[in-house]
Structure formats: structure tokens, C-alpha cells
């Protein structure tokens, strides 16, 4: 079944109908309509999957997708146009440019924590780039994946963009087939298997993985505001966000205050009993619930700690003085448990972060610009947000992706288009001016070699329109000034006597 | 601990000291590399002569010039490439600092190839050094003399901990691939490319694969066939056909086939004299195994030019084949040798179809005077690159990304692309802890009103460029009206 879907997608792609921009725009508009018209159904599916609140759905998923679609529709003409490249002396009369082209059939494997955002955002880029795409939503968010399978064919071309549902065996079957790019969002463990499968067909991959995103709070910043922002980011979607602040690093002297501020903020956000708050989510399934409860074992929480297995509910929990080598600090939590690890100062925090795998995001709360720049310079991570959490995800001019174990490749906005296109170098020469080429043909001698060397090492010339305009303007102004200078000199020379006369020299 | 493990460990320790971060240190290493290539010109040329029988001028033209160009460009542009890159802001982030910060990845593994042992090993190294990485260099063991020279001499110029040269054959390479790197840059065949990527997958290491394929060359019947054939002949028989972007086979209409044959025959004579075997500028096949492989490919096709060989010297004359079809032996794999098959097609439509039935090549060559035809080939085919009316030269334009697609590779390099490929582009958003009121729309408890505000802020797109231009215009109008009022009454 999977094989047929991929085969049909490839045949549909080879028919060439994704090439014209009008077609791609039409599909993007259709996707936009789907999001707008089916918002209620999507919200219901998400409530059943993960107890997402009615407002969180648009806030966290749909607005992001809308944004991407609007940007793609507006900019598609610009993105897909040939891009002139700088020429050198040898190629000055040639056409030299880079042509973005579709790759072919892209496989998009979605995740369960943001089933719509993480599946449809890559799809927007795939459509914009002119590819066909096989969409495989995660089976853990069952209602959403079934809804997607029902809805997408009603709005988009059903051959070009099939939805394939299923679990591990169906995914494995898909991965045996050949694609031109695979976009995978999920865990590092599964990502290794995806990349290995891709290697067999020499398929490039984009892997959006996770990791433990550290959150450093400097003692001299506004702790109240910092904690409010961290609390928001941590407990959204019940902590099941790839870029959620995983753990806090701070000095022991402010630990108590941090705990207090988080406690207060939790009260503000979810009330005294988060279980009753419509805005607080649940853990996606029993396995993850048990996993997270297991991580908390042996600790006494300073905030929260309550749970209800029947609802897969875990209260927003904060643990303090967590030892760096505990189990809690070995794997990505992906749940509403916030450990605080104390460090003696910022340098210590930097060492702590660098001893571990490169995270997907780094959060720094600090008012000192120099210290911020130092921390950015001495660490590495997929992305950084300073004095807030997760917001670098919302700006689609910033490339979103990981590094090292947190992933490879990036997307969002134009970057998805770039990632899912092939940038073909094109050079159109003419069959004339053959004499210029003589230097490169055998038999080679010193003279020819020297000429060839000169031609090949000539510097790149910026032939863009803006430079040309500046060059012309500068020449005109320069010439104008020169002429003005000459005129003044002439007048001065000619009026030498009159000048002195006027000054009263001849008085 | 094995030799390979030690080298990687030392490189990583050295990288972690942070000494590659300052731009001055990277430029210093790049200058040293430049000195290496210029001072050791003779050693390099000798090694290449022993490996591939390439003449000294040939080595300079095809290997070292490219490297020198890359180094000079990197030195000149490094500050620009490594600087934080500002990006467009949204209404929500209008008062924040938003930029992309290029950072080194860590330890890069560069696996070189044997056909241009210096160019395809040192050019990626330039990008690696410029991006601030450490790099383990593994030259191909097949070009043993060049590998030896690299192993002996490179450490005398570059930091020997940061940029170790590790030589060896298949088992040593496999041992290297078991180590953990932050990026692997591989140039070679697709078959080995798959193994490299599989090994990289175990550590989630990103890869750049510069592979090969059969690069087709279509000659339109209405173009200047003499010039076209001269350029094709040059491109094909350079390095005895052992170039990843050499025109692998020619597609043309039957009416011009004999003309094409004649012209190529004449060019071969012009370039390599009547007896290419004795001619200095004509190379040799790298080893007996490849010699036998290429000789076997001639089976089933008719030789119209050349065809003679000498196994003791690994010499194969520049050869042109006809009566070749898509099923011939010579069309089953990348030739990588001095055999040029000519396949007849009824026109550009059939040529496009022929090309599309096969794997995406590293480059497609089109020879035609008609711009429309060229644009059509571009639109209806796919390849790493497309070069019209010449061969190979797109490799020398450092503003063009050089790389493959599909089975011909992934990722690209040259110039700035080399730097970008071997850097991590880290998104940075620096906000402030004030203006907390703006954030209240995102905090629970959620209400419809808050959502409305969020929608407004997140979906409003600001074109800052246009705003700036409008402000400038307004200022100009203000000044102009002031001048008019004051002075021109």
C-alpha cells in the first residue's frame, strides 16, 4: 500500500505538474483554506490526543502554519527565480546563475507532540519547492493522524501529497522505498535508523531531534519575569515540546527565589489545581507517563509532584538541588518536570553545558550584554533565545534546526524551501571567443600556463544591479566634482585681479 | 588505542581549547596552507606525475590553481563570512537583536579521492579551516605518492594536532569511520558513498558527498560543431578521462555523427599529437584494476578513433566509440576513462528522455546556439549543475555551488558554500526582560481576546526594507521642500 502511494506520487511528480508556480500557489491556498475551515475539527482531535486546550491549538500550531503559508505564497516568485551569481573575468560575458529546482518525492515523518505544526510546516516548504510529498503522521497522535488522512486529500492533489498512516512496520516499509529527501521529526534513536535507511538510497535527510535544552538564570536579572517566561515555555503542552527548557541552571543563592516565582506563576496560569484547568495538557500515552514518573523517583518535589495515572495527568513539578549525574539528567525529560541544578557561576554553567551533547536550544536569562555574548560564544546549540524561551521558533526568518545529536538541516520560512530544493549551478557560455580558451588546451607550455593562471585567478566581480547603480552614480558624482573643481580653478585664475579688487586690495 | 582514534582524539582536544575560534588563527593557518602549495609546487607535481602521469603544467592548471584561488578568497572574505548575519524581524521582535551566528562544527573528516588528489582534498580543507573546525585528512591510498607527500609535508605547515593526515587503505578508513566526527566530507564513488553515510548515521553525523555519475553531453546539430568538439575533447581527455565532471558520453543526431567523430579525431591529434603515448600532456590510468575495468567496457561497441592500449604503462589511447546504445556495456557504469561513446538520438526530446531515464548526473552539458533549447534542457532535466557550450569550467567559478543531487551527491562547496557547509548556522534571538505586558496574550488562562491579539502580532508581516525606503523618501521630500522654500522663492 505504501509502495503504491509512493509510486503514484513519483509518477505525478514526473508528469511535471508541480513545476508551474501557479499550481504550487493553488495547492498552498487550498492548504490555507483547510486550516481555516477545519480549525474546530483539528482542535477536537488534539483534545482527544493530548488534551490540548481550545486556545492552545491555534496559538501553538495553526498560527504558525498560517504564517508559513502566507510567507510562501507571497515570496514564492522570488524564491523560485534564478539567482545570478558573481562572475569573474573569464565568465564576464556568460550567464551564470543558480536555479532552484524540486528534488522529487519528499517523505515527511511527523511527530506526536505538535502533530499538525510539525507535519504541515515541512509540507508547505515541500509544496513551495515543487516536490511531491508523502506525509506520514505519528501514530501516537491517533485522532490527528486519522483526521489528516481524511482531510488532506479533499484539499490537496491526492496523488502528489498522499497521507500514509500506520505504526512501526508501515514506517519501516516506507523507509525501504526510495525518496529524494526525508524530513524526520522525533527522537535521536529513531533518527539513526531513518538516516541509515536513507543512506541505502543516498537520500539526503533533515532531522529535527531533541535533547536537553538548558536554561541558565543569572543572579542579577529580573527573576520574576524570567521565571514567568520559563514556566510558560516549560509547561506548555505538558512539557512535551522539543524546545522546552529541559532544566534550569542557577546559583544556589537564587534557587529559593526561583522556586517561589515558579510556584506563583503556576498559580496564576493554572490555578490551585492544574488538573481542573482547561489549559493544562496530559501526557500522550501510558508508556511516556510511566517513563516520566520513573524519572522523578527518589526525589521530593518542591512544587507539584501529584499525578493521576487514569488521566495520564502529572502536575507541574519542580525539583531542586538535582545532582548532575542523576537519571533525570541523562535523558530528555519531555514532560512537566523541571529540575534545578545549581552551579557556582556562569563559567561553571558553560562547562556544564559543554560537557553534554549539543542541545536543540539554549536559554540564557541575563541583563549583562557582555556576559550574554560570552555565553553564546563559548557554547553551541541549535538555536539561542536570550531572556525568553522558544521565541526563536516563531520568527520564520531564523533557520530552525539542531546540531550534533539534536539534528541536522534546518527549516522554517525560506529555509524550508531551500532545504527541499536542489540549487543547480547553471552556466551558459557562447561558442564564440574560442581564442580565449587556447591557453587551456594542450600542448601546455609556460606561456599558455601563465595566461591560464591569469584567467583563472581573476577576482570575482559583483555584477549585481545595485553595485552597477552605485558605480554609475559614483562616477557621475566624481566627474561632476572634478568639473566643478576645474571651473572654480579657472574662474579663480580668471578673476584673480577682480577677486583681489573686490577684497579691497586696490583700495 | 589505534592510530586513527588517537589522531581524532588529539584533533578534538585541540579544537576544544578554542584556538580555532579567533579569525586571525584561521587566516594564519590558511596562509600556511598557501605557502605549502606554492613552496612545495615541485614536490606536488612530482607526486602527481608518478601517480597519474600528469604534466607539471597540467597539475598547476587543474590542481593547485584551484586551491590557491580558494585560499585567497577565503582569506579575503573570512571576516564577512564569519560575521553574525542579521535577519528580517517581525513586529513582535522589532526591538530585539536577531541574527544567525556561524559557528564551527568541531572535527571534520575529509576523505579525498585519487583523481585530483590535491584539489579534492585541499579545497574542502580550506572551507573547514575557514569555518574554524579541526579536520582529519584522509587522502586516497590509490594515489600513493601524493598521499605520502601530503602525510610528510602538510604537518610541517599546518597545526599537526588540528589537521592530522591519516593515510591507509580500506581497513584504516573503516576504523576512521567508526570514530565520531561532526561532519564527514567524502569525494568518491556512489557505492562507497552509501557506506560512508551509513557509518555517519550511527553517530548522527551530517555528510557532504561529492560523487559521480554519467554526465551526458548533448550536441545540437545547428551549433558550431568544430568549437563544440574541441571543448568536449579537452574536457573528456584531461587527466585521461578520470574527472568526475568529464563529459561521459555524447548524444547527437545521426546526421552530424560522422562530423562529430571527425572533429574529435582532429582535436585529439591537435592536442596530443599522432602518438599520445609519447606525449607529455597525456596522462595514464591510475592502476591496473581500473585499466582492466575500462578496457572491458569497450566490449560490444565499435572503435572509430584510438582504441590502442598498453597494460604495462596503464596507457589507453583517446578513444571514440560508436554503435553504442543505452544497453551497451559502456553505458552501465561511469566510464572514468578516455572512452567517449557517441549515442544517436532523434532530437533534443529523445535526448531529454534518455537523460531522465537514468540517475541524476553530476553535470549535464549542452552545446547549442539556441537559448530556448538550453533553457528547455534546464527546465526538463535535473543534475548537479548544467554547463552550456563548454566543459568543466563551472568548477572554477567559486560563486557557484559545486555538488551533486540524487546519486551524484548531496551538499555542495566552493567559495562561501564551503564555509557555510562546514559551519553551524546558529539562530540567535536576544530579547529583554522588560515589556512583559506584551507577553500576557500568550499566557494561560487563555481567552478568545488574548488569542485575537496573538494572531495580530504573529501574523502581521513587516517589510522593514520598504519602511526604511519610505522614511528616506519622506526625509528627502522634507529637505527638498525646505530648500525650495528657503532658497528658490
Image (cartoon, helix red, strand yellow):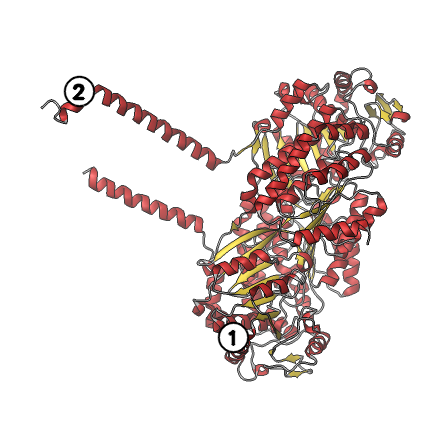
Q: Nearer the viewer, residue B328 or B214?
A: B214
Q: Residue A497 carries which label?
A: 2
Q: Which of B278 and A348 is in front in this view?
A: A348
Q: Quadrant of residue A473?
A: top left
Q: Quadrant of residue B290?
A: top right
Q: Looking at the image, do the residues carrying marks 2 and 1 touch, with CB atoms under 8 Å apart?
A: no
**Relative height, residue A472 to residue A328 (above, below):** above
Q: Is residue A142 left or right of residue A70?
A: right
Q: Which mark is residue B45?
A: none
**Relative height, residue B237 to residue B168 (above, below):** above
Q: In which quarter of the image is residue A410?
A: bottom right
Q: Which chain carries label 1?
A: B
Give coordinates of residue A84: x percent, y percent.
Answer: 56, 37
- Check the picture and name the quadrant holding the C terminus of chain A: top left
**Relative height, residue B46 to residue A97 (above, below):** above
Classed neighbour count for the residue bearing mark 1: other residues with Cα under 10 Å, few (<14), some (14–19), many (≥20) = many
In this rendering, the label closer to the viewer, 2 or 1: 2
Q: In this view, does B123 lie to the left or right of A261?
A: right
Q: Nearer the viewer, residue A121 or B153?
A: B153
Q: Which mark is residue B444?
A: 1
Residue lying farthest to the front in this orientation: B156
Give coordinates of residue B7: x percent, y percent.
Answer: 76, 49
Which element is circle 1 on? loop
- Check the picture and name the quadrant holding the N terminus of chain A: bottom right
Q: Mark 2 lies on which chain?
A: A
Which element is circle 2 on? helix
Give coordinates of residue A40: x percent, y percent.
Answer: 57, 70
Residue A68 at least partly seen: no
Mark 2 → mark 1, Cα distance in angstroms: 85 Å
Amino acid at each position: 500500500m505504501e509502495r503504491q502511494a509512493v509510486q503514484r506520487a513519483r509518477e505525478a511528480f514526473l508528469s511535471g505538474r508541480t513545476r508551474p508556480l501557479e499550481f504550487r500557489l493553488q495547492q498552498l491556498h487550498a492548504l490555507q483554506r483547510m486550516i481555516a475551515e477545519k480549525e474546530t475539527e483539528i482542535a477536537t482531535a488534539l483534545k482527544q490526543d493530548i488534551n490540548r486546550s481550545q486556545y492552545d491549538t491555534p496559538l501553538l500550531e495553526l498560527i504558525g502554519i498560517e504564517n508559513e503559508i502566507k510567507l510562501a505564497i507571497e515570496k514564492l516568485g522570488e524564491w523560485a527565480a534564478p539567482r545570478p551569481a558573481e562572475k569573474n573575468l573569464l565568465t564576464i560575458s556568460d550567464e551564470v546563475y543558480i536555479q532552484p529546482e524540486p528534488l522529487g518525492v519528499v517523505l515527511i515523518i511527523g511527530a506526536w507532540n505538535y502533530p499538525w505544526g510539525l507535519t504541515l510546516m515541512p509540507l508547505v516548504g515541500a509544496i513551495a519547492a515543487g516536490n511531491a510529498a508523502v506525509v506520514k503522521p505519528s501514530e501516537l497522535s491517533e485522532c490527528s493522524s486519522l483526521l489528516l488522512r481524511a482531510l488532506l486529500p479533499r484539499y490537496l492533489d491526492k496523488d502528489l501529497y498522499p497521507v500514509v498512516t500506520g505504526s512501526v512496520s508501515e514506517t519501516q516499509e516506507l523507509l525501504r522505498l526510495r525518496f529524494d529527501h526525508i524530513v524526520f521529526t522525533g527522537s535521536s534513536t529513531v533518527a539513526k535508523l531513518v538516516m541509515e535507511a536513507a543512506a541505502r538510497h543516498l537520500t539526503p535527510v533533515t532531522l529535527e531531534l531533541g535533547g536537553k535544552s538548558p536554561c541558565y538564570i543569572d543572579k542579577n536579572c529580573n527573576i520574576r519575569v524570567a521565571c514567568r517566561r520559563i514556566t510558560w515555555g516549560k509547561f506548555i503542552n505538558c512539557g512535551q515540546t522539543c524546545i522546552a527548557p529541559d532544566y534550569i541552571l542557577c546559583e544556589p543563592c537564587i534557587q529559593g527565589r526561583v522556586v517561589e516565582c515558579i510556584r506563583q506563576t503556576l498559580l496564576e496560569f493554572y490555578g490551585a489545581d492544574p488538573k481542573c484547568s482547561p489549559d493544562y495538557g496530559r501526557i500522550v500515552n501510558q508508556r511516556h507517563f510511566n517513563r516520566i514518573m520513573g524519572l522523578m523517583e527518589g526525589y521530593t518535589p518542591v512544587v507539584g509532584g501529584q499525578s493521576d495515572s487514569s488521566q495520564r495527568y502529572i502536575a507541574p513539578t519542580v525539583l531542586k538541588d538535582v545532582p548532575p549525574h542523576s537519571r533525570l539528567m541523562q535523558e530528555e525529560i519531555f514532560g512537566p518536570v523541571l529540575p534545578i541544578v545549581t552551579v557556582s557561576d556562569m563559567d561553571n554553567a558553560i562547562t556544564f553545558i559543554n560537557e553534554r551533547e549539543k542541545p536543540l536550544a539554549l536559554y540564557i536569562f541575563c541583563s549583562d550584554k557582555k556576559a550574554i555574548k560570552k555565553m553564546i560564544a563559548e557554547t553551541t546549540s541549535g538555536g539561542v533565545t536570550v531572556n525568553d524561551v522558544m521565541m526563536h521558533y516563531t520568527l520564520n526568518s531564523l533557520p530552525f534546526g539542531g546540531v550534533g545529536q539534536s539534528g541536522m538541516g534546518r527549516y522554517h520560512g525560506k529555509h524550508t524551501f531551500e532545504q527541499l530544493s536542489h540549487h543547480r549551478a547553471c552556466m551558459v557560455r557562447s561558442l564564440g571567443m574560442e581564442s580565449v580558451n587556447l591557453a587551456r588546451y594542450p600542448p601546455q607550455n609556460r606561456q599558455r600556463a601563465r595566461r591560464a593562471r591569469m584567467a583563472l585567478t581573476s577576482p570575482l566581480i559583483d555584477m549585481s544591479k545595485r553595485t552597477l547603480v552605485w558605480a554609475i552614480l559614483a562616477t557621475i558624482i566624481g566627474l561632476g566634482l572634478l568639473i566643478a573643481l576645474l571651473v572654480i580653478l579657472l574662474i579663480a585664475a580668471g578673476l584673480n585681479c577682480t577677486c583681489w579688487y573686490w577684497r579691497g586690495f586696490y583700495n | 588505542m589505534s592510530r586513527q582514534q588517537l589522531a581524532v582524539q588529539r584533533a578534538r582536544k585541540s579544537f576544544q581549547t578554542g584556538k580555532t575560534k579567533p579569525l586571525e588563527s584561521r587566516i594564519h593557518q590558511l596562509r600556511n596552507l598557501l605557502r605549502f602549495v606554492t613552496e612545495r609546487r615541485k614536490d606536488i607535481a612530482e607526486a602527481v606525475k608518478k601517480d597519474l602521469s600528469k604534466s607539471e603544467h597540467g597539475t598547476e592548471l587543474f590542481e593547485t590553481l584551484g586551491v590557491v584561488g580558494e585560499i585567497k578568497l577565503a582569506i579575503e572574505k573570512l571576516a564577512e563570512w564569519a560575521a553574525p548575519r542579521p535577519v528580517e524581524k517581525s513586529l513582535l521582535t522589532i526591538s530585539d537583536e536577531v541574527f544567525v551566528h556561524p559557528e564551527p562544527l568541531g572535527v571534520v573528516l575529509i576523505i579525498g579521492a585519487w583523481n585530483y588528489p590535491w584539489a579534492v582534498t585541499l579545497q574542502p580543507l580550506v572551507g573547514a579551516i575557514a569555518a574554524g573546525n579541526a579536520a582529519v585528512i584522509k587522502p586516497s591510498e590509490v594515489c600513493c605518492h601524493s598521499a605520502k607527500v601530503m602525510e610528510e609535508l602538510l604537518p610541517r605547515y599546518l597545526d599537526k594536532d588540528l589537521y592530522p593526515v591519516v593515510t591507509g587503505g580500506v581497513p584504516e578508513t573503516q576504523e576512521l569511520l567508526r570514530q565520531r566526527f561532526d561532519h564527514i566530507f567524502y569525494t568518491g564513488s556512489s557505492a562507497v558513498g552509501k557506506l560512508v553515510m551509513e557509518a555517519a548515521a550511527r553517530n548522527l553525523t551530517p555528510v557532504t558527498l561529492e560523487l559521480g555519475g554519467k554526465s551526458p553531453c548533448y550536441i545540437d546539430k545547428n551549433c558550431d560543431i568544430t568549437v563544440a568538439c574541441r571543448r568536449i575533447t579537452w574536457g573528456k581527455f584531461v587527466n585521461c578521462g578520470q574527472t568526475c565532471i568529464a563529459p561521459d558520453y555524447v548524444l547527437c543526431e545521426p546526421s552530424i555523427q560522422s562530423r562529430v567523430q571527425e572533429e574529435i579525431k582532429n582535436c585529439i591529434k591537435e592536442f596530443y599529437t599522432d602518438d599520445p603515448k609519447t606525449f607529455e600532456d597525456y596522462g595514464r590510468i591510475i592502476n591496473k584494476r581500473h585499466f582492466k575495468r575500462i578496457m572491458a567496457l569497450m566490449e560490444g561497441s565499435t572503435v572509430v578513433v584510438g582504441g590502442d592500449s598498453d597494460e604495462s604503462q596503464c596507457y589507453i589511447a583517446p578513444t571514440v566509440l560508436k554503435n553504442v546504445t543505452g544497453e551497451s556495456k559502456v553505458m552501465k557504469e561511469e566510464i572514468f576513462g578516455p572512452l567517449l561513446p557517441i549515442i544517436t538520438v532523434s532530437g533534443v526530446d529523445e535526448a531529454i528522455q534518455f537523460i531522465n531515464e537514468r540517475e541524476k548526473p553530476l553535470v549535464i552539458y549542452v552545446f547549442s546556439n539556441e537559448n530556448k533549447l538550453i533553457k528547455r534542457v534546464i527546465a526538463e532535466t535535473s543534475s548537479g549543475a548544467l554547463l552550456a557550450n563548454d566543459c568543466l569550467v563551472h568548477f572554477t567559478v567559486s560563486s557557484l555551488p559545486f555538488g551533486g543531487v540524487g546519486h551524484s551527491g548531496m551538499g555542495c562547496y566552493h567559495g562561501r558554500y564551503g564555509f557555510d557547509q562546514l559551519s553551524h548556522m546558529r539562530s540567535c534571538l536576544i530579547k529583554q526582560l522588560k515589556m512583559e505586558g506584551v507577553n500576557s496574550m500568550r499566557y494561560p488562562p487563555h481567552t478568545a481576546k488574548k488569542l485575537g491579539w496573538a494572531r495580530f502580532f504573529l501574523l502581521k508581516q513587516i517589510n522593514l526594507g520598504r519602511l526604511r525606503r519610505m522614511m528616506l523618501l519622506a526625509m528627502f521630500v522634507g529637505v527638498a521642500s525646505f530648500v525650495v522654500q528657503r532658497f528658490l522663492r
